[in-house]
Each structure stands twice: as C-alpha cells, then as structure tokens.
Amino acid sequence: MRLLLTTLQRGAKRSLAAAALAAAACENAGRGGTLIIASGQDPQNLFPPTTDRVVARAVTELLFDKLADVGPALNTIGAAGFQPRLARSWDWSRDSLGVTFHLDPRARWQDGHAVRAADVRFALDVYTDTLVGSRSGADLRSRIDSISVGDSLTCTVWFKERTPENFYNLVNTLIPLPVHLLGRTPRDSLERSDFARAPVGNGPFRFVRWEPLQRVEIVATESFYRGRAKLDRVIWTIAPVMTTLVQQLFAGEADFMDELPPADLPAAAGNPDLRIVRRASYGYGFLQFNLHDNERSAAHRLFGDRELRRALTRALDRATIVRSVFDSLGVVARGPFVRAQWAADTTVAQLGFDRAAAVRTLDSLGWRVGSDGIRSRAGIPLEFTVIVSTASKNRTRLAPLVQEQWRQAGIRVDLQSLDDNAFNERRRSRRFDALLNGLATTPSPSGIRQSWTSSGAKEGGFNAGRYENAVFDAEVDSGLAAGAPRAAKAHFRAAYQIIADDAPAIFLYEPVTVAAMSRRLETGPLRGDAWWSGIPAWSIVANERRRRDSTFSRSP
Amino acid sequence: MRRLLVSRAAQSAVVIALVATLAFVLIHLAPGDPFSTSLDDPRVGSEIRDRQRALFGYDRPLPEQYVRWVGNLARGELGYSHTLGSPVAEVLRDTVPHTLLLMGTALVLGLIGGVALGTWQASRRGSVAEHAAGAAILFALSVPEFLLALGALALFAIHLRWLPVSGMVDPAMHDSMGLVRRVADVVRHLALPAGTLALVTAAGVSRYQRTAVLAVLPEDFLRSARAKGARRSVVLVRHALRNALGPLIAICGLLLPALLGGAVVVERIFAWPGMGRMMVDAVGGRDYPLVLAGVLAGSVLVAVGGAAADVLASLADPRLRNRT
Amino acid sequence: MAPLFARRALRSTGARMAVGILALFVLCAVAAKQLAPYDPRVQPAADTGKNQPPSRAHPFGTDGASRDVLSRLIYGARVSLGVAGSSVLLAVTVGALVGALAGFAGGWVDAAAMRLVDAVLSVPRLLLLIALVASVGPLSIGGIILLLGLTGWPVTSRIVRAEVRTLREREYVHAARATGVPEWRILAAHVLPGVIPQLIVAATLALASVIPTEASLSYLGLGLRPPTPSWGNMILEGSDDPRTWWLVLFPGLAIVATVLSVNALGDRLREAIDARQYQRR
C-alpha cells in the first residue's frame, strides 16, 4: 500500500515536472530549428544589385531589408497595402512625384552601424551606375529623377513622371546598401568584391558561409529590429541533378523545395512525411513564330501569313499537351500574361483546338497534302524548324508533342534542341522559324512591353518574332499609364484579345508551381513572386525536431 | 633517374601547353560569351553588356586575348568565374582537393580489390569460380559509370536508405561535430561515389593482375602452393606482388584519365563538390575561364600522376628503368 | 590467315553468344522499320497513356510522351550503333595511318606523332569532349561522330605502331627491301596485311570505349539531342523518376549487353592472336 502511494506521488511529481517543462517549451514555442532548402544552383553572387538567380534573390532578400514590401494581395499600383520594412512610414508630395521615406531608427547593419538615409541614396547611385551592371538599373534610371536626403533618417525620391507602378518598382528593386562599407570600392569591382561573397546586411538573417557547389548558410539576427526570426538558421544545399534534389527531400535530408518537377508530384503526394503547397506562378510558355525573314528583310515565307498562323494554332490540342507534360501542374495559357497578375483576363476568346477547321483553312490557303502526308504549295513543303533550349526540361518534353500533333495535320517540323547559349544566340539574332520559350514575369504586367510590343522588336529586344501591331502597342501603353485599375484592365483586355487573334505566338502553358516541404515545417501561405519572403515567420513543429534543429555552432 | 625525371617533365609541359592552346582556341570560337547568358535580360541595355565585355577583354581579337591569357597564366592568374562569383584560383582550391579525395580513395580501394581479385583468379585458373569472376569483371567493365552510379543511388540511398543521397558533408550538423565524427561524416558521403569508381577500377586492375601473376608464376609453383593449403594465398600475394608491383604502379598512371572521366559523371550524380561537376556546370554558363582551368587542371593532374607513376614504377622495378 | 584466328576466336560459346547479341542489335539498327512494333514518334495518348509500365501491348512500357519504349530502343540502336560504328571506323583509320607512318618512318616523325598521342591521351577523354562540346555548341550526328572519332584514335595508333615496328624487322621485309621494292609498296603489300588482326582488336577496344562515352555525353545532356532517340538520352529522359524504372533499365541493358559482347569478343580475339603468335615462334 505504502509502496503504491509513493509510486503515485512520484508519478504526480513527474507529471508536474513535465508540465513545467512543457510550459517552458510553450514560451519559446516555434523558436529554433534549422531549415534546409534543396537548390539546383549556386547563388552566383550575393550583391543585391546584380543578383539574378532565384537562390541568390532568396538569400539576399533575407539578409537585406527593403524600404517597404508588397502586401499579401500583391497590389502593384500606388502604395496601397505595402508593408513597412526599413521605412517606418512614407508620405507623398502634393504633386505625387516625390515620396519621402522615414527610416526606422532601430534598424542596424550587422556590423552595428545604424541604417541611414545616405545608405538609400548610395544604393540608388549604385543601382543606376552602368559600371555596376545592375539588371534593374535601366528601369530605375528611366523612372527616378533624383533623391534628396533630409536628415539621417529621412530621404525623398523624386520620380520623372507619374505612373501607377512607380512605388512598386522602386521599393521592390532598390535594396539599401551600406555606404560606410562600400563607398570606397570602385564601382566596376563591386560585383566581384568580398562583400558580394560575404555580405553584411541589415535583415532578419545574417550571412555565415557560402561553400561553392555545396551550401549557403545564414542564421537569425539575434537583435533584429522587427523581431527575431523563429528559425535559428537556413541552409541551402546545392546539387546539380533534379533527381538528387528530389531524393534529398524524400530522404529527409532537405526540408523544402520551391519547385517540384511535375513528374514527382504523385510520389510526393503519397509520401506521409511531405506536404505539397501550391503557389501562384509567374511564368508562361509559348511557341513563337518569326514574322520576319532576317536575311531577305521581308515577311517570313510562312509566318508572314496571319491566316496560316491561326490555322497552326487551331491544329494544336493545347489541353492534351499541357496535361501530358504537367499533369495537374499546368494550365493552358490564354495570352501573354499569367493568371496571378491583376491585369489577367481569362475571358479572352481563344483559337481553340479544331483540327478539321485548321485543315480546311490550310487547304483553302493552297497547302495540299502530298503522297508523303506532308502539305505543300507550288512544290514547297509546309515545313519549318522549331528550336528549343535544353535548359528547360518542360519545353524539351513538350516539343515532340507539338511536332507530332502538327505532323497529323500534314505539317512537318524539324525539331532542334539547342543548348541554352546557342538557343539565346539564335533568338537574339532572329535566326529561327519558330521557337519554344518561356518568360518569367512579376505581379506587374509591365513586362509585356519588352516582350510583345514593337519597342521590344528591335535587335536584341525580347520580341524575337517581331510582332508589330500599332493598336496593340497603344492599348498596352494606355493600360500601363492608366491610374485606375478598372481602366487599366480594360485596356489590357483589349490588347490580349488583339494578340490572341493575330496569333504571333501560340500561348501554351502556365505552370502551376508547387513547393514540396517536410511536414515538420510550418510556413503559412507562400507568396507567388517570392516564396521566401515569409521565412522569418516559418517554424519547425516542436515535437518533430531533429538533432540538426538544436545543434549548431553560431560562430562562422 | 634524373634524366627520366627531366625528360618526363619536359614532355608533360609540352603536352599541357598543347592542350591549353587547343582548348583556348576552340572555346573562343563558340557562339556566346559569359555575358550573353548572365546578362541576357530585357532590362539590361546592350551598353552594359558591352562595358562588361570590354572590362574582361572579350571584345578584343582572339590572338590578343590569347597572349593576355598566357601572360596571366604565367603569373598564376587564372581569371574570374562569373557563374560562381569568385576567382578561378579559389574555385580550383575549393574543388580540386575534393576530386583528389574521391579519386584517391577510389584508386586505393580499386587497387587493393583488383590485386586481391586478380591474384585469386590466377591461383584458381580454370575453375568455375574463376570463370564466373571473369564474367563479373567483364560485366563491371561494360557498365558506364553513370549507370552504375544511378543504380547505386537507387539501391543504397533511395531504397535501403543506408547512405546519404548527395553532397560531401551533412550540411547542418557537420560543423558542430568532433573530429572523429566529421571524418565519419565524410566517409559516409564518400562511400557511394568512391565505391562506384572503385568498382570499375578494381575490375580493370584485376585483369592486369591476373595476367601478371600468371606470367611470373610458373604453373608448378601454383600447383605446389595450392598443395600447401591455406598459407598459399599469403605466399602468392607476397610473391606475385613483388614481381608485379612495378607494372601495377605504371597501370595506375594509365588509369587516371578514365578515372577522372568517371569522376565527372559520378560527381554530378552524387552532387560531390569536385572539379568535374564544376566543369559541366561551367560549360552551361559559358564560363570560359573556369572551363579552361578545368581542362588544364585535369591535364596537369593526369600528366603529374602519370609521370609520378612512371618514376615510382621504375623505382619499384629496375627492369623497367631502361625502357624510356 | 585472318579468318583462321577469327575462327579460333569463335570456338568459345561466350564469343558465339557475343556475336549473336551484336548481330541482333545490328539487325535492329538495319531493319528498325520492319522490327519495331510501333512508330517511335507516335504518341497515341500523350496525356493518359504515358509512363505505362511494361505490358503485353508495350513489352518495355511507354515513356513520358506515351511512345513505345521498345520501338524507340530499336530505332535507338540505329543511332547509337551508327554513331559508335562510324566514329570507330574514323578513329581506327586515322589511328592506323598515324601508327603506320610513325612506325615505318621512325625518327622525328615517330617522335612527333607519339608526343601528339601522349597529348591526346593525357586529357581525360570525357573532359576533352565536354570542352569541345562547350566550344562547338550543339552537335549534329555528324558532329558527334567526328568528335568521338578524332579523340579516339591514339590507342589504335600505338598498337599499330608497335606492330609495324616488329613486322618491319621481319626477314621477308628485309628481303623485299634488298630487292629494291619501294618503301610504300613494302608498307602496303607486306606490313599492313600483317597488322589487320591487331587492328581488329584495336577496333573492339575502341568500340567498347566509345559506346559508354557517347552514352555518358548524352546523359550529361551534351551529346545527341532529343527527340533523336539514342540509348544515352533515353536514359537521361527517364532517370528523373525512380518509379519509371523501365525507362532506364532497358536502354541501360542494351548498352551493357553491347559493350559486354564487344569486350568478350575482343578478349577472345586477343587470345587467339596471342596463341597464333606463340605458335609462329
């Protein structure tokens, strides 16, 4: 009996102790842990103005804070919904050409210096300096007139013109840089400086190491002015082969992968340790016709003909193609936009799949089927080359599907897979009949100008097929200049309908991007244009912690 | 001996110079340069591309670029890698040791395994077991390394989960480990890539070893050794090794190019951070300085390894000394 | 003379099996159109019929575009063996010419040729090919044959040189020289025929190394480009997902079976030649 009593008492004591421990754990709930991200590439450099690859952007945007960040609604017009970062607040000048930022006095560079207005001005200087070679320099140069520093925590940016997306473009691209560390470095060697490989930031994480071909490691900034990140550290492991990356995730060696290949979706969905999260995608793929013949400087022998282009579009069963390549991870694109953009319009009338109609048009155009099953007109076969870059697995898989469907309509396609450099060389110099390509966009629809209007048609521009239609151009320009979203959307809808009818390209797919992650990880929704932006709030479920979540050496 | 060394060194130098020039010319004839990819962005004006090209001299005529490159090379400057954002010399410093570790391990394991196997085969000449082993060896020699690597990955890392999928160290834990556990960590990661290469090496070595043992050991010796029973293997190995060591070392030199070629594929599949994987990545990014440095480093490795093997072989076996 | 050693080599079951396997693949390559159950390009159901495991209708399954793997394998034999065969022919021809020249001329010609051989051999072939592909860009079938051929000749030239140097010192060659026969005719009439067995062995060696090399190059994405089906790039396309094992296994087996047969045949031929030389002494 006594024995039983003591045992009970002991048990009670034990459960009390356990409760105390649990309470302590609750206080630190969500704190700590290591996130391992599987990446296919090295970051190339970690200097914000010159970063380009996704890894590099993810790492630098966790090391450096912006002035303000797009809100969850991803609105890009005006400053509505933007969240304060380095700038605690901002106000517009009366003519709305100037915006004054008030910096957070608690913000610190990781070497202890305060973040000052001079850092903002310096950053703008660096971004717009052609010696630096920033990818967004030209855009900032064309938008921004000057920047004036009030006191050490106040600065005003003056725009050249009033356009709806000024604020978005400014705060989304410009990342303040420490003038006290970089002011003396020659501009043309900034990209290759030590800072670019081991940056000193002011963000929620600080840099620890980058071992080329192996890993990048960052750890939480302990006394971060907006509150310490929940995770202790984030590590990117780098492997060049997709199979290896996916297997790292399956084996629990990595926790997160931002883009799961469509082929691996069933396996990932069936894995009890993994969770699949869809996120908005900002890319679309298309087959682009070259409307001009570069050598003869005349219309292309085939694709100068609008009716032929329309017939070719009708001959493709895009839905089947997309299902074959992407399974459920892709939808048919409806124009030069993605559904996640505010200007998107899925009601644009399409040239849908109708082989019979396509065949009738081809017949009426004089393209008759010969004995070999291939159409020809006046002895010239309906035959052309489609180039595709081997850098894109999806498009390499998609190309033979297009080739085969057209063959069934009597059209012969010579498919050329080129390595990325050769492909881009051909695209830039316009030496192609048709090409398969993809574009990455942003929440803003402004990219359409470079890619599809006549301003992008000149040598080197991204409108490689040289589609030129003055009405289309005008609608796009009006859409970009319109201050009210409704008016802008109407203009964009008109533009999208024109380009769909002219068929200078066949808009094929919009991938639905899914991230795959360990169930240990709690992330909340992922932002479509920057999945990494929420990482400071991510955490590892407390009872799923592993050794790697608790043991790590803080010193670099 | 000294003459051998000098002539071998001179020979290697000529060969490397030839290779370097050839590689330089060919790679610069290719379409595109480092900036045609890295700055291929509608937002970047052509003036920025041109300025960057001028900065690195890619706008100069080829002969001028060549002279400058050779000059820099002579001063030990290998240029700057645009895909990895660091000087080429640093990239080599980071990657070459990893490749050496991988190849060295594979070579040692392959040699031990191959010698043992070959000697055993010679001692069992004509038996069913020997025939089976011979067939297995031929099979191993006929499988391309990338297939072996894919198979090993699927079996040991994915299906059985015995070994890590990729990399050289545990990315999260390695730095907080003690020395012993760090070594163990690397060994675990090394097992699959080195094992793949070692298997191929062992298969090759065993064939030489079998022939060599049969050539030096008269038939009756084998018979008497066999008659003596268990101790025969010891005798065999000692006797056979003494005579076959020289050629064996020389063969190691000959195996190096194939081993390095295999390392390229294996490093890629297992994400081993070595120079072979670095080179394939660099080709994609038109990272000229890195590709050139990779070819050079590979050639130097093979040349130095080959020369060292020759010299060692002639030290080990005086009969070889008068041949070159 | 040559048929005799070939006949001796073929006496073993292993060698006969090897010849059988190779003959089967060559037959596939030649009569692909008649043998393949399907058109390798046709995608009967690109969305629903893809990645089907082996079945009665598709013994080797279907790939990611619902194409029949067996048919692609058969057509792939044409590409893979064609590339391998042509490049080996090129390599052996170049190698034989260089080797014969070096061995027969001797002196500085010999020294220069052998240094060149050393140069080519001292760069790992795959590394050299990667650099070459980097420089010449995307490769056509002709281009890849040329590259493989021009990097594959040194081994042959060494073998031929050694053989020519031995043959050159034979009595009948000396006799011919004494009677005033011109050097080139001695080379053509007396030395080269004697080299042929060694040349065949060299060709098997070259073939056994070129097939995996081409496959590796294709696997790295630097060789033949899809949709041209080669065994190497079929593996590349299929190796993404461990669950579609048939996309890797069957082309992999085809490569291994071919190389294994070539290796086995080469071994028997070498043994037969050694035996012949042993008898002659």
Image (cartoon, grey):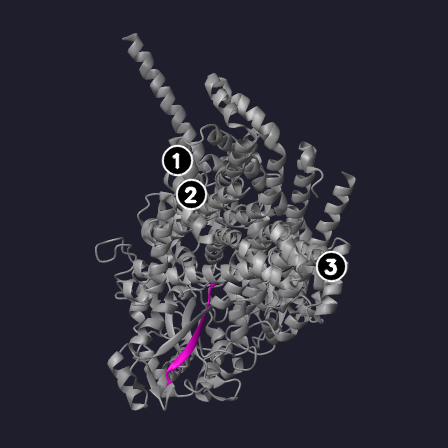
Q: Quadrant of residue A493?
A: bottom left
Secondary structure of the residue carrying tag 1 is helix
The residue lying at 53 percent from left, 28 percent from top is: B218
Separation of disc 2 and disc 3 at Cα?
Answer: 59 Å
In this rendering, the answer to whether A320 lies above or below B267 is: below
The amino acid type found where label 3 is placed reads Thr
Separation of disc 1 and disc 2 at Cα?
Answer: 10 Å
Which numbered tag is attached to residue B139? 2
Density class for disc 2 (Cα within 10 Å; few <14, some 14-19, many ≥20) is some
Q: Residues at marks 2 and 3, common chain? A: no
Q: Residues at marks 1 and 3, common chain? A: no
Which numbered tag is attached to residue B132? 1
Q: Earlier in the sequence, mark 1 or mark 2?
A: 1
In the image, farthest residue toward the front: C179
Q: Chain of mark 2?
A: B
In the image, farthest residue toward the left: C56
Q: Position of residue A241 (x, y in %)?
A: 47, 52
Range of residues picked out in magenta: A381-391
Along the line of sight, the residue nearer the viewer: B189 or B14: B14
